[in-house]
Amino acid sequence: MVLAVLTAAITAYLLGNLNGSVCISALVAGDDVRKHGSGNAGLTNFFRSYGSWSSLLVILVDMLKTAAAAFGAGFMLKSFGYYQEGLVLGAVVVSLGHDFPALLGFKGGKGILCGFTAALIMDWRIALVMLGVFIIAFAITRYVSLGSVLGALTCSVGFGVIYYGNWIMMGGGIFIGVLAIFMHRSNIKRLVTGKESKVHLIHKDLNK
């Protein structure tokens, strides 16, 4: 079983290194998203740099890799009777791989797409509430970062309340939410000081 856990964790981490923004900017534009805007390898910076349509590919890559990591880990541990624990393991480690990718110099994205997909796999009800909170916050303020932080907070609170006593699910959900909030610490500082940039969905596609 130890070998299965290690294999699942390593696979999930390597999948996390497959950054959607970096991959799609290279494939679609022959460029590196990290050379533009904030320098971050995340969806928001990609959207600002390349436009909306190619951003859908980034979403697809990051969501699929998270699902593959979580379900893959669950499958590896299922024969030992730890399918749910495997899902949580894969979800947590792929998020770490996305945020701190060794193959990209440990400078990755901020984990919102990974976190949302992980929550969707672990408990779709919490994920839907997260999405609702994000949409409302973004619609009112046009701050992606604020919606992301509030969505991440919803993740931690949701898993903490609903899964209290189930330490694996509770711990995994809280960790994923707290990690996303931590990765947005610079955004939080800019929000507090009024220096954060807003995002508008009507965006000219720079690839045209």
Image: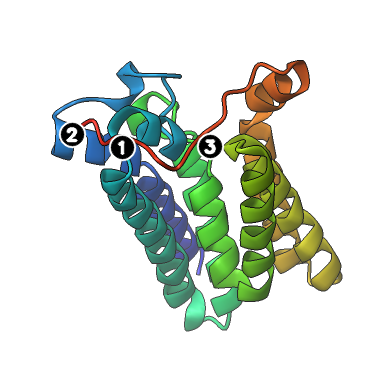
Q: Which residue is mark 2?
A: 207
Q: Which element type, helix, strand or loop, lies under badge 2?
A: loop
Q: Amino acid at mark 1?
A: Gly
Name the residue located 53 percent from the left edge and 43 percent from the top edge.
111
Which residue lies under the disc numbered 1?
51
Outermost residue, front side: 202
Q: Is residue 179 visible to the viewer in this orientation of the structure?
A: no
Rendered image: mark on residue 110: 3
**Residue 164 lies in quadrant:** bottom right
Q: Earlier in the sequence, mark 3 or mark 2?
A: 3
Q: Nearer the viewer, residue 92 or 80?
A: 92
Q: CA distance from mark 3 to mark 1?
A: 19 Å
Asked if 7 appears above or below 72 in the picture, the reply is: above
Front one among 168 and 183 = 183
Residue 185 can be seen in this image: yes
Residue drawn at x 69%, y 47% is 137
